[in-house]
Every structure is written in structure tokens, then in C-alpha cells.
């Protein structure tokens, strides 16, 4: 909540006082040569509002009151988002008129300059374009502001974003900019309305033919200050400032801020021409020139950014497409992993096959070795049996096989001799059921039988 501040004349309203039966005073927002601005709350709606009240001594001048009420009614008809909304107009019991307006949150351009110094030309041009849009509607209603300055261009925080709004149609001054003295407004009772730092030559001469081109001059002076941090015409006194405005040519903004674009400097120079005929004839022309500059500046900035990016890319070497730098290593890693797994599987299969082969070979080799050893052990006995004429135990032959082909005695002996094998081998190779055949009793072999068998 705003705190109560001293105000000129008899306009000291204590917090809690009721104005018009429906506005409760909360504090003082600002004061100027013609009146005071109070912070208040609507009793029924609970809405925060700002109330401008004209000084009692000036309220006695019908011309001042008529002008204030005319401009207030005109502002109430405006629909531009860049004009502060007027909600109500009435009079105090003393007869002093007051205006009820929307209360804004934010800061004016004077405070912005005091906090951060000169603005980037993109921001300064953007603010001036918004001011031109608001003044276009004001001028269309036949009203000249006459007191344009950074203090009266307010950057309001709105749901739509940061919006510039035009304040104070010549009746008040923001106390938050007192640090900018002596460049604060010199509007006082009995002096020319407006601030000489932003006043056109014809306004200083109090020309009766003052028109919208006076506001064009003020906008040029404001743009100059936003870019450089100083006014185009400065001096130690109001009289010296007026002398410079009337006689001296406007300086170039590039003399104080060399990086100011030349095209923008030419626009400022045209606004600050001494003769109104040599300036932009209205805010529509000025806004069109500023927008053209914005388009050219934006295109130039884009081209410069592209050139910088190209040069950087060329210096850095071939660029990798977005995403490829991560995809490619992942594909290589996957391929290597699959190859390793495949090789491992092949190795395992080969090892298993070789292990199985060795097992079978060992089994077969062991069986063969046992059989050979047994044969060697029985060979001498077999030879002795043959020499003695004793036939070994005959081999069992299947019944079906014996019935189909009877075996002669000699053949039976040969078969029995050959088929005799160690018990281990026989046990390792089980055979089907056999029946023992009756073999005729053999007689003792004689030399004649041997000679007949071998053809001797």
C-alpha cells in the first residue's frame, strides 16, 4: 500500500478519508503543479483506483476546469490499450474536479532509465511505436497531450504482458522521479504547461495553432533520451533550455551512442526539426517509419546471426546432424556386442562337439584296448587247444539262424573259435535270446583231416 506523502496546497487527504461517498483513500501516488494523484479503493467493488484531484486554487479558473473535464470525457471514450482508462469524473464539495482512473502496476520510462541507463534501440523503438498507437486515437479526438515525457509513459504489467500506457494529460507529475531534477517538469501555476526538455518551439512560443506535431517533437526528444540517457537540449536553467530549443540544431544521437543505427538517428532528427512542416505530420507517419526500421533491423540481425553461425560452423569443421552423434555409437556398440555373443556361441558349440567326440573316442578306445588285452591273454590257450585237438565251447547261434542254414562241423569250430571274445566286451554288447544247438560229438582230428581241410 502507498504511504501518505506531503502534497501541495490544501490537498492533504488522510488515509481512510472517503471521497464522493464511495472511494476510500489509501495514500498518495504522486503530485504535480496542477494537482495530486491518490491511491484509493472502491468501497462496493473493492477495486483499486487512482484519483486525480485539481488544486483548489486552480479549480477557480474555469478554463482549467473545462479543459480537464473535456480531456477526461474524451479519454473515457478511448478504447486503445495504450491509454489509461478513465472510470469516473466528479467534483469535491469544494468544487475541485477529480478523475478516477485505473490503478496500474509497473514503472514509467523515467524510472526505467534511472535504474538501467540507456535502452537497447529495439526496446526503445518498441515503446515509441506503442506510444504512437495510443496518441493516434487521442489526436483523432482533437486532443493534444502537450506534456509528453518519460514520466508520463508507463510500462504496465497486464495479463497480456508489458503494455505502454499514456498518462497525465497535463495535470500531474510522478513523485518517484524526483531524482531526475532539474529535468523534472516545470509545470507550475503561472508557467507554461509542460516540460521544456520535451517541448516543441511552437509550444514555447505559446502558439495558438498548436497541433499533433508538437507531440511528435516530444516523442523525438523522448526517443533520443531512451537511446543516450540524456535529453537533446540540456542546460542549467529553464530559460537556457528554451534558448537552445529555439536556436540550436538538435544533436545526433550517434554523438553520444555510436552504435545507434543511422536510420534511427535520421528519424529522430526529423522529429526535432524546428518547423512543424519539416517533421512527421502525425504519429501515424512516425509509427510507419519506426515499423519500417524495425523490419529492416530484424532482417539485418537475422542475416548477421546466420553469417555468424555459418562462420562458426566452418571454423569448427563438418557438423554432425542432430541425433547422429548418439545414434551412431549406439549402433556400433550393438553390432560389436552381437558379434561377440555370436563368436562365444560358436566357440561353445565347437568345444562341446570336441568334448563329446573325445568322450566317445575314449570310450571306444578303452573298450578296444580291453578286448585286445583279453585276446592276448587267451591266444596262447587257444593255440594250445588247437594243437591238442580240443575244441572250445561252441558259440550260441539263434534258433532261426541254425534252422535256416545248418553249420557243418568244421565251420562250427571256425565260428566258435573266431567269435570267442572277452566277457567284458560281451557284457558291453548285449545280444538277443539265443538257444544252444546240439553239436555232434567231434572226433579227434587226424593228420588226414588236416590235409583234406587245407588241400594238402
Image: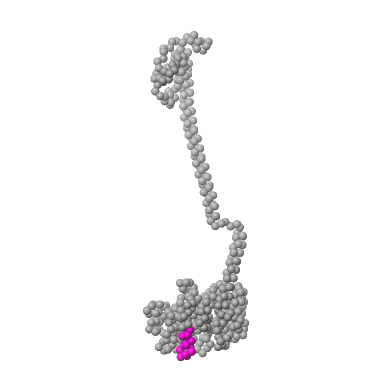
Point out the image quarter for the N terminus. bottom left
Residue at image location 41% in from the left, 87% down from the top: 92
Residue 171: percent from left, percent from top: 48, 84
Where on the picture, by quarter, is residue 13? bottom left
- Report the number of numbered marks: 0
Where on the picture, by quarter, is residue 201? bottom right
Residue 424: percent from left, percent from top: 43, 24
Q: Left or right: where does residue 287 sit relative to residue 23? A: right
Residue 217: percent from left, percent from top: 57, 81
Q: Left or right: where does residue 253 sit relative to residue 47? A: right
Residue at image location 47% in from the left, 74% down from the top: 157
Examine the rendering and report whether any part of residue 190 can be seen.
yes
Q: Is residue 1 magenta?
A: no
Depicted 228 relative to depicted 358: above or below:
below
Region of the chain picked out in magenta, as a range? 59-72
In this rendered view, identify the residue nearer to me: 222 or 208.
208
Q: Is residue 63 magenta?
A: yes
In this rendered view, identify the residue nearer to me: 152 or 2.
152
Amino acid at each position: 500500500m502507498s504511504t501518505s506523502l506531503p502534497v501541495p496546497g490544501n490537498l492533504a487527504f488522510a488515509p481512510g478519508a472517503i471521497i464522493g461517498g464511495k472511494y476510500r483513500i489509501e495514500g498518495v501516488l504522486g503530485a504535480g503543479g496542477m494537482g495530486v494523484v491518490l491511491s484509493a479503493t472502491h468501497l462496493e467493488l473493492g477495486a483499486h483506483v487512482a484519483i486525480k484531484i485539481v488544486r483548489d486554487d486552480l479549480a477557480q479558473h474555469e478554463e482549467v476546469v473545462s479543459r480537464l473535464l473535456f480531456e477526461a470525457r474524451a479519454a473515457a471514450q478511448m478504447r486503445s490499450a495504450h491509454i489509461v482508462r478513465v472510470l469516473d469524473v466528479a467534483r469535491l464539495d469544494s468544487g475541485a474536479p477529480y478523475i478516477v482512473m485505473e490503478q496500474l502496476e509497473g514503472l514509467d520510462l523515467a524510472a526505467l532509465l534511472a535504474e538501467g541507463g540507456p535502452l537497447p534501440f529495439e526496446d526503445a523503438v518498441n515503446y515509441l511505436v506503442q506510444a504512437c498507437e495510443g496518441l493516434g486515437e487521442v489526436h483523432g479526438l482533437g486532443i493534444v497531450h502537450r506534456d509528453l515525457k518519460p514520466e508520463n509513459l508507463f510500462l504496465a504489467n497486464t495479463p497480456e504482458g508489458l503494455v505502454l500506457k499514456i498518462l497525465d494529460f497535463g495535470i500531474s507529475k510522478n513523485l518517484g522521479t524526483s531524482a531526475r531534477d532539474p529535468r523534472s517538469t516545470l509545470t507550475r501555476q503561472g508557467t507554461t504547461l509542460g516540460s521544456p526538455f520535451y517541448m516543441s518551439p511552437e509550444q514555447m512560443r505559446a502558439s495558438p495553432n498548436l497541433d499533433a506535431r508538437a507531440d511528435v517533437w516530444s516523442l523525438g526528444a523522448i526517443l533520443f533520451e531512451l537511446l543516450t540517457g540524456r535529453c537533446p537540449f540540456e542546460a542549467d536553467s529553464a530559460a537556457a533550455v528554451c534558448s537552445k530549443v529555439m536556436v540550436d540544431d538538435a544533436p545526433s544521437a550517434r554523438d553520444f551512442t555510436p552504435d545507434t543505427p543511422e536510420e534511427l538517428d535520421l528519424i529522430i532528427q526529423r522529429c526535432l526539426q524546428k518547423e512543424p512542416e519539416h517533421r512527421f505530420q502525425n504519429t501515424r507517419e512516425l509509427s510507419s517509419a519506426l515499423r519500417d526500421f524495425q523490419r529492416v533491423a530484424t532482417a539485418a540481425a537475422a542475416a548477421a546471426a546466420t553469417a555468424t553461425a555459418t562462420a562458426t560452423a566452418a571454423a569448427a569443421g563438418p557438423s554432425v546432424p542432430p541425433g547422429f552423434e548418439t545414434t551412431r555409437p549406439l549402433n556400433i556398440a550393438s553390432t560389436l556386442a552381437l558379434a561377440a555373443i555370436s563368436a562365444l556361441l560358436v566357440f561353445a558349440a565347437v568345444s562341446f562337439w570336441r568334448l563329446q567326440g573325445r568322450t566317445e573316442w575314449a570310450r571306444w578306445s578303452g573298450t578296444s584296448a580291453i578286448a585286445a588285452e583279453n585276446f592276448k591273454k587267451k591266444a596262447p590257450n587257444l593255440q594250445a587247444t588247437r594243437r591238442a585237438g580240443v575244441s572250445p565251447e561252441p558259440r550260441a547261434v539263434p534258433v532261426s539262424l541254425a534252422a535256416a542254414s545248418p553249420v557243418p562241423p568244421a565251420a562250427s569250430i571256425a565260428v566258435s573259435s573266431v567269435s570267442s571274445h572277452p566277457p567284458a566286451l560281451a557284457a558291453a554288447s548285449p545280444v538277443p535270446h539265443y538257444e544252444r544247438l546240439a553239436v555232434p560229438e567231434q572226433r579227434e582230428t587226424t593228420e588226414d583231416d588236416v590235409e583234406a581241410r587245407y588241400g594238402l
